[in-house]
Amino acid sequence: MRFVRAKLFGFGKWVDKEFDFNANPLFIYGENESGKSTLHQFILFMLFGMQPKERKFYQPKMGSKLGGQLVIEDPKVGTYTIERFDDKYNGKAVCFTSSGDTYEETWLKERLQGMNLAIYEAIFSFSALDLNAIKQMREENLGDVLLSIGLTGSSNIYELEKQLDNRLGEMFKPYGKNPAINKQLQVVEHLGEELAAIQKEESTYRKKVLESLELEDALNKLKRQQANLTGEIRTITKKLTALPVLKEFQHLTKKQEQYETTYDFPASGIARLEKLHDTLRPLESELAVLKSNEENYRDNASQLENQRLAESTVETLKIQRRHKERYTVLKNTEENLYQRKVELTKKITNELTDLQLKIDVAELQDLSLPFYIEETWKQIKEDKEKLEQESISLETEKNGLMEEENYLQAKLGEIKTMLLPEEEVASLKRKLEKGKEQEQLERLYEASMNQQQSFAEDKKQRIKRANQLFLIGIILSILSTVLAFSMDVSLLYGAALFLFLLATGQYLFHKLHIKAMEKLIRSQPGLSNAQKLSDEEIYRMQSQLEAEDEKLRELKAVQSDIQKQQINILKWEEKERMYLEKVRRLTDQTEEQLMLYPFLEPINSSYWPDYFNRIKELLRLQNERDRLVKEIEEIRMDEKQIEEELITYLHQFGETSIGSLAEAFLFIEQTLDREVELEQRINQIHELINHTQEQKENMLKRIAVHQQELAELLQKAQVETEEEFYKLANYLKEKRELEAALEANKQQLDSIFPQHSWASIVKEELDPFSLEERAQALESLATTTETEIDEIQKKLTEVKMELKKLEGSDAYSSKLHQFEMEKEKLNQLAKDWAIASMQREMLAETKQRYQKKYLTKVVEETTTILHTITDGRYTNVFAPKEKGTFQVMSAEGLRFNVNELSQGTVNQLYVSLRLAISKVMTEKHQLPFILDDAFVHFDELRVERMISVLQEIATKQQVIMFTCKSDVRTACERENIPSVYV
């Protein structure tokens, strides 16, 4: 993956700016606050987005919207563009491929293979602020970075590891009391002790429970017996109460047997018969009236038909009447158009007066404004306003530059007057150096005296040790000779000779070494007689020299500011020249427009766009007025033609006295109105005739319907005369009354005996004396049963009281259930703790495995890069162990801790480490590498070596570097490496 191009619509100081990233490696050079870091942040914003508060910091000051585009070339999907805006989709990305497809931010995350901002900055991006991080980097820090290489989403793994540690601590501690498992153990032990105490009372409790169950069973049997007796007594009592009703029901049932014959009779037959007679009488009378009215209507219609004109004559008059409507429309249109023409003429005159233009109506007709003139006048207005603002800005900038230059010149003079003479500064330096030399000589002399004293003691020990070794060697040599002679082994003679030479050699070596050390100690310089400076004098001289150095640095800073200020003044003069050129071009454009349109001369060019719209409106009004004049002339010709045609027709019709168009229209209207009136009267009479016929037909139908109903009513009753119909109705009425009495009796019995149980009772022989005897016997038995129930209830109450005392407030079953529940809860907690512990061990094992996998590669690559940068001065790099830090080995074989290295070497080691991590990472993620001022403490030679390393990396990975160091830019020019200046 590589960046192709970035377009910033608005981001920090950058507005409508575009950058190309085609060169590789690409060095972007610029001074401080030139926007390099802002461009760096824009690239990160395009890839990973920002929180709303962070986006607010980069909101452009000039009012442009925050956002832009980043074009990326991906070997898998080709070229695509990332687009983000602060005010769209809450800052989320939209991706556009070269094939025209559009994707959301989820697709972009897939292209980045799960890479987030934290991992990218830890591997592919760093700045000068990160250079000291290697001093605090430990084994676990390096391991975390390497884990992020091997596992996508390592931030979730760190969070999971922390959560597991917290969870294990909250669940169990060997000697804790607050964790959940510790608390649950205490609860289970306490419940076990309580349960053991309750078990002692369990045997007595069971006996009482059995006795209670037996008493409850006997009590339930007696209650069921008592309920049966009570029900039977209640039934006998109801029979005695309802005895009269039951007797009456038996009597009505016997009487109903006399009305067993059933006849079909229409419902409400009598009422329906009488109603039919009442309906037929008025219908027959109304039918006679309708027949008389129909004859009168026909006579009147015949008389009116004789008074009407011929149909052809009426049609001709209607055609002529339509000319009136057309003539009226034309007349109204003419008046409206004439009124509109007068208004337009007045409006044009008033508008010309208001505008105060040197142009009349005739010239206005010949005036033409092309479509592009409005834009030209608007551009002149905008250019004029911009130039006015630019003039004010230039004047303000000039005043600020002059004030700043005067201030810097005054400050420069003030610093020069405060500087010491060069002779006095040189004298102070010489005195200070002599004082330091005298102090060093004193320290050397003191050290020499101490060395001589310690050497005297050491000399005795060395001589004693040399004598002892020489004596041991001689003894061993003699022993070897004796053994060789006795055992006849020639090899031992050689060993004896070797031991003799070794003993003699070491003895002579110690003698010579002691003499050399004595000579060296005696040659130490003696103490000179020069005067020694006091600490106060040294401090005073150093303070004076430091103050002088501070003044010189301040002097150089002011001189540098003056040079920058002079450059700013030259830039301002260039701006002024460009401003005058813009003024000249605007003047030429204005004069050109005045030549084309002289009437604009008295008008300020700032108002020309407003005048354009009003002049355009005047031209439109003038065109509309000309159109109205032409339409009025055409309407008047049509009016004259209508008048001639109408009067000619009426003269042919016989009305020669009509001489005007108004009289002709009046005659036609009166004739047609009279004809319409006759036609309406005839139509009304015909409608009355038709209505009368319809009424007559309806009346006949209604009479036939009622007569049919009467015949059907007699047929349903199966009789031929109305007298037989009335006799049958009386029979059925008596039968219904008997059935109603039976139904009332049944309802009365239903209210006494539920669920229709009286149906079987009415069939019995009901004797009131037998019923009373049976009721008394049942009441006696119920009283005996009630007494037995009371005795058993007393015994059951006593047993339950004893059980309640045994159970107490915490019953055994409840305590046992609680104990099992708490024990189950403890088992579940132990299971959860075991699962979390196993997860923590698996996570630690996974981290260790990935660290071992990548650590060797990273350290080897770091060693190679550092060896190249330092030109072989350091040959090896050692990763931190446990709580230690990085170490490096020099060409001489010496190891140095990272804190013992110079600042430049520390920075170079960190850069080498980051480049090595990036190189290892390219095996999984092909992402560009970004550096921001990473060579702050590099000298010129190491900068060139570093650039060579970056060139090598750029063959496999895109490299972009932001820098403000001029030596980096110079090195790039020498190597012909493209760079961009911002």
Image (tube, rainbow, N blue to C red):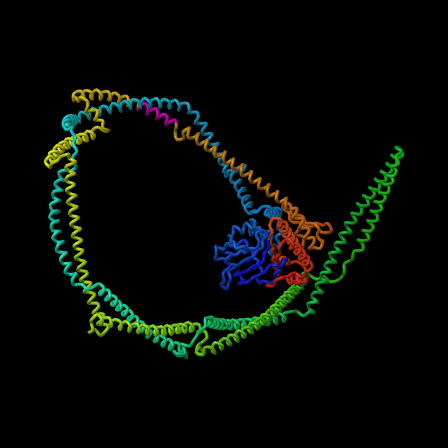
Q: Nearer the viewer, residue 91 or 619?
A: 619
- Please give the name of the residue rendered at 73% of the width and 62% of the height, measured from the top-left corner: 531
The answer to which image quadrant residue 625 occupies is bottom left
**Residue 278, position in %: x, y?**
11, 44
Examine the rendered structure and indicate whether residue 451 appears above or below residue 63.
above
The answer to which image quadrant residue 406 occupies is bottom right
**Residue 244 appears anywhere in the view:** no
In the image: residue 198, left or right of residue 973: left
- Please give the name of the residue rendered at 45% of the width and 79% of the height, measured from the top-left corner: 598
**Residue 880 appears anywhere in the view:** yes
Report the magenta stretch's main SS. helix
Q: Nearer the viewer, residue 142 or 87?
A: 87
Examine the rendered structure and indicate whether residue 212 appears above or below residue 48.
above
How many marks on residues? 0
Q: Is residue 50 magenta?
A: no
Q: Which of 643 and 796 is in front in this view?
A: 643
Q: Nearer the viewer, residue 908 or 22?
A: 22
In the image: residue 436, left or right of residue 674: right
The stretch in magenta equals 793-806
Q: Residue furthest left?
A: 723
**Residue 172, position in %: x, y?**
52, 38
Q: Is residue 804 magenta?
A: yes
**Residue 672, position in %: x, y?**
21, 65
